[in-house]
Amino acid sequence: MEEEVDNIYAILPPPGTVLGEATDEEMEKAAGLEVRHLALMRLQDMNIQFDGSSYKELLKDFHEFETDSSKFWRGVCSRLSIPYEWPIRIDYANGPIYIGDHDLYEEVEKED
């Protein structure tokens, strides 16, 4: 980021704010990560009992997903010069990169 701030959330735009456009490669990668995320979440929700070797393999898959996801989003944030902690999303059908829904933003009321 170009400007120095004491609190990255103080400059967080409201949900829905478009920050830039994703490349075709970023849209494909974001879509792929979303599919992997949903698959892993559904597997967790199934509450299946695993043996030791299956657990280790599944843990490896989770670790690989988190590593890939973190690397991807760090690259996007770096390209846009925004904090990694901001809740950004990519519309992988149309390309805008925007601030996702969050409860961190409080609109400052103007004093009359």
Image (tube, rainbow, N blue to C red):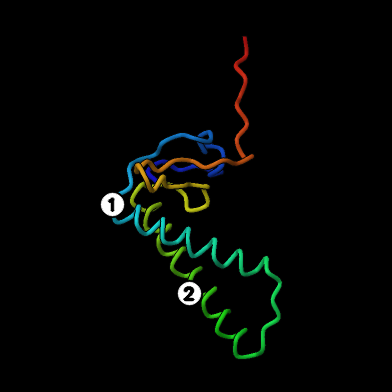
Q: Mark 1 points at which residue?
A: 24
Rendered image: mark on residue 38:
none
Which residue is located at x 37 percent, y 41 percent?
Answer: 96
Considering every residue shown, the one lying at the far top of the view is: 112
- In the image shown, does 4 or 92 lie closer to the viewer? 92
Compared with 105, 36 (above or below) is below
Picture coordinates of residue 88, whole percent (x, y): 48, 47
Please state the total of marks drawn on the protein image.
2
> Residue at position x 28%, y 52% from top?
24
Nearest the viewer among 73 and 55 is 55
Q: What element carries label 1?
A: helix
Q: Where is residue 17 in the image (x, y as percent from the top left)?
A: 46, 34
Amino acid type of the residue tagged 1 in the rendering: Asp
Residue at x-position 51% and y-position 76%:
61
Q: Which amino acid does label 2 sit on?
A: Glu
Horizontally, residue 29 falls left or right of residue 23, namely right
Task: Check the picture and name the quadrant holding the C terminus.
Answer: top right
Residue matched to label 2: 64
Q: Horizontal and vertical percent for residue 74? A: 42, 58
